[in-house]
Amino acid sequence: MKINGQPHRTIWINEAGKLNVINQLSLPHQFEVSTLSNVDDVCQAISTMVVRGAGLIGAAAGYGMWIAAKQAPTDSLQSYDAYLRLQAARLQATRPTASNLAWAIERQLKKLDFGDTIAEKIAFIKAEAEAIANEDAEFCRLIGQHGLGLIQGLALSKPSKTVNVLTHCNAGWLAFVDFGSALSPIYAAHDAGLDVHVWVDETRPRNQGAGLTAWELACHGIPHTLIADNAGGHLMQHGLVDIVFTGADRVTRNGDAANKIGTYLKALAAQDNRIPFYVAFPSSTIDFSLNNGLSQIPIEERSGDEVRKVVGKLDDGLIAAVQICPDQTVARNWGFDVTPARLITGLLCERGICAASESGILGLFPEKV
């Protein structure tokens, strides 16, 4: 995607051979590029959400393994491989919910069997990191093309021709390497000349909708309106939402989807108002080993300070965190919830659109039967 007319990805190797990422903690008020020099940097970037979003976490882990490969001890192939497995475990422990993280690390660990020398192993692991990133970008581009037809159909059926989309959290290109998942069909529709408008949930407690999704849409020139999280149901009741697109951090083989906390409530409101609710993701998000999202998907609980405080720009331009509750109040902060397959109209991935069911998913992925 483009920022000030210049194409960017969220993560890349720069001309000096260093790993660069867009620092999402600085957005939307400042665009900042951070350099990750060692595995500690990558782990911290993932855990503190300098980089976040299912696809980007996976790509960051893939590149983190490349950094580990360059910095591993070289006294023997055995100690070299042991060091990489140790760093893989550290990377995997940073965020528990998104399946893309473990998926990318597993791909890299398989590369340890390639190459007879350490130099060859480094080359294979670097190539795999680049492949993971490139696949993520391409898969998200395809998600946009598949989802475009859904928006085109709504545009043809509406007298005003304006299609109003509701989204939750940030599942745009900032959450992936490029294009995004839930926002990719919106970008494709806008670029195709369709009249599309986006209702952007704040997405508390970290406000990724207000800070990241709104920033992305503004950069791309897409009409959008920021709303309070609890306004979505009201808009649906009054016919102001035509379709809901969300992303996912893990999808089970039966179609249950874990996404940012609050997604489940949007799905309930959409069902009650007969509004199509689609979940978009690359196939790296599917965990074929699970068949019950509510009982089997691990839900990350983060610091309560993310609920107790809000970060924003003051009138004098300074960025500050302000406390919004009494000093003695304790907060709990679950990062995700699970939307049951029965509430999902369809799943949208790089291979197409399917029903939120095991048969629907296996129809697109027959090799997983």
Image: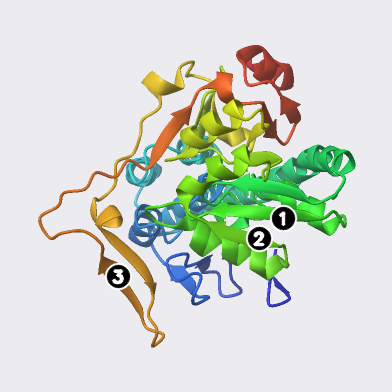
Q: Is residue 11 visible?
A: no
- The percent coordinates of residue 319 (x first, y second) are 37, 78
Depth check, mark 1 against mark 3: the one in front is 1
List the residue tagged with mark 3.
Answer: 321
Mark 3 crowd level (few <14, some 14–19, many ≥20, 10 Å Cα): few
Q: Nearer the viewer, residue 323 or 130?
A: 323
Identify the image quadrant of residue 324.
bottom left
Q: Do labels 3 and 2 touch, CB within 8 Å?
A: no
In the rendered image, residue 212, in percent from the top left (x then y), is placed at: 53, 61
Read off the residue under disc 2.
224
Tags 1 and 2 touching, CB below 8 Å = yes
Q: Nearer the viewer, residue 182 or 178?
A: 182
User: Which amino acid type corresponds to the residue marked 1 in the rendered image?
Assistant: His
Give the alpha-carbon distance from disc 1 to disc 2, as whole Å: 5 Å
- Can residue 361 be spotted in the picture? yes
Residue located beneath label 1 in the image: 197
Q: Residue at x 57, y 50 (%)?
A: 129
Name the residue located 71 percent from the left edge and 48 percent from the top edge: 164
Marks 3 and 2, how far apart at CA:
26 Å
Q: Secondary structure at mark 3?
A: strand
Q: Which residue lies at the image location 84% right of the left edge and 50% below the top edge?
A: 160
Which numbered disc flags the more N-terminal residue, 1 or 2? Answer: 1
The outermost residue toward the front is 238
Q: Say what secondary structure mark 1 lies in.
A: strand
Which element is circle 2 on? strand
Residue 132 location, x and y as percent? 61, 46
